[in-house]
Image (spheres, grey):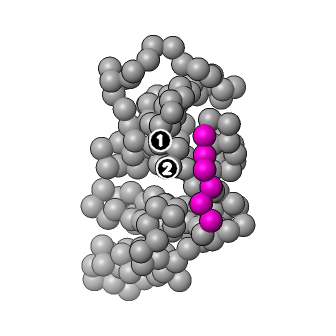
Amino acid sequence: METKNYNKQNYYRNTYAVFKEVNPKDLPFSIWHYHSKSGSAYFYTKAGVYRLSNHWGRAAKCRWVLDAAGKIYVSKGRSRIGFAQWTDFYENNESTKSYFIKVDYQNLVVTYDHRSRDASAQAIYRTAKDTQKIIQKVKKLLTTSSWAKYYEHTDLEVLRKELIEELIFS
């Protein structure tokens, strides 16, 4: 896979990145460089970009997620600040199979990642759109149980995991 160099002039064009959460008290600046129409704010450094936002996941044609103490946020919520190095950005081509799905059964969370971040992952790679479709199905399996009445089973958690694994790896 070809590697592209990103900077403040091109990082916002069809990219994927995982921002690491930053404590507001630890910011090395006090004024943001840019405020977007959607309410996010950005500060640029030679190493990367800080982003203040209340929405993570899909941002225009980008897919930017926030890693907050090992938990990946991909939804709207309270405002959080994240930092991503320029080397943390990868191409987000909607027609390329670049994404794989990860499930945290203990915390009932499903997320996705880019193949460039973990090329060794034992995964099925999908387009961004197909990945989102599977994630929606997995979320339903993780967070509800009404679907289970249509299956013969003795252990709901075993059935849940089997169905999710089948969705992810097929």
Residue 7, above or below 96: above
Give the quarter of the figure containing the N terminus.
bottom right
On the question of residue 149 being in view, the answer is no
Instruction: In the rendered structure, find residue 88 and report the number of the disc placed on it.
Output: 2
On the question of residue 67 being in view, the answer is yes
Instruction: In the rendered structure, find residue 67 and report the number of the disc placed on it.
Output: none
Which of 160 and 46 lies nearest the eye of the viewer? 46
Residue at point 50% right, 37% down? Answer: 48
User: Which amino acid, by three-letter code, is at mark 2?
Assistant: Asp
Q: Residue 8 appears at what percent x and percent y?
A: 62, 35
Q: Residue 167 appears at what percent x and percent y?
A: 50, 77
Name the quadrant containing residue 68. top left
Residue 143 in the figure: left or right of residue 133: left
Which of 107 and 17 lies nearest the eye of the viewer? 17
Name the quadrant containing residue 36. top right
Callout 1: few (<14), some (14-19), or many (20+) C-alpha neighbours within 10 Å? some
Residue 15, above or below 21: below
Secondary structure under tag 1 reads: strand
Q: Residue 50 appears at what percent x and percent y?
A: 49, 31
Residue at point 35% right, 49% down? Answer: 71
Which of 142 and 124 lies nearest the eye of the viewer? 124
Residue at point 53% right, 26% down? Answer: 43
Q: Which residue is mark 1?
A: 84
Residue 50, above or below 60: above
Is 145 part of what is drawn in magenta? no
Region of the chain picked out in magenta, as a range: 2-7
User: Which amino acid, by three-letter code, is at mark 1?
Assistant: Ala
Secondary structure under tag 2 reads: helix
